Amino acid sequence: MKLVIVFMLAIIPVYCRTNSSGCNRMDDAIAKTINSSVPMEEYHETVKKYTTLPYIRSTVEKFKECFAKQSNDTQHNIFVMVYAVYNSDKCSGY
């Protein structure tokens, strides 16, 4: 499961680079994935465009549940990491 999380987080800058209109939606999806207080129904509403197949929907549910089980410190550190990736020298201008 940790490897899946690493791959999903690693693809975020690539997705935003190739699809400039998707970054705000992706930011919202990331925020709702990491935020354990967001109910699953609201989360599904946010990601439904990207989870049309049942196995993808199941995977993102597990991904959200994984973050929901993390401590507040871990969730905060993930926000810090995402912010650092988006604001790095390699990503500026995308």
Image (cartoon, rainbow, N blue to C red):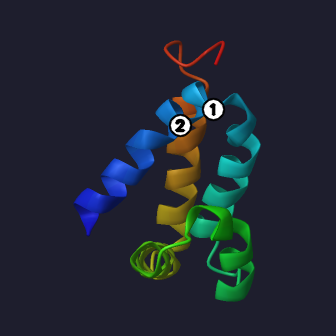
The disc label shown at residue 19, or none: 1
Is 77 placed left or right of 25 in the picture? left
Local SS, label 2: helix
Q: Which residue shows up at 51% across the image and 75% down it?
A: 64
Q: Are marks 2 and 1 in contact (CB under 8 Å)?
A: yes
Number of residues whose C-alpha sits closer than 10 Å to that of mark 2, classed few (under 14), some (14–19) or many (20 or more): some
Q: Amino acid at mark 2?
A: Tyr
Number of residues whose C-alpha sits closer than 10 Å to that of mark 1, classed few (under 14), some (14–19) or many (20 or more): few
Q: Position of residue 93 (x, y in %)?
A: 66, 12
The disc label shown at residue 59, or none: none
Task: Please identify the residue farthest to the front as the structure is shown.
Answer: 53
Is 81 or 91 nearer to us in this picture?
91
Q: How many marks?
A: 2
Q: Amino acid at mark 1?
A: Asn
Q: Which residue shows up at 49% across the image and 77% down it?
A: 57
Q: Quick one: quadrant of the N terminus?
A: bottom left
Q: Position of residue 73 (x, y in %)?
A: 51, 64
Per the image, the residue denoted by label 2 is 15
Q: Which residue shows up at 61% across the image and 24% down it?
A: 87
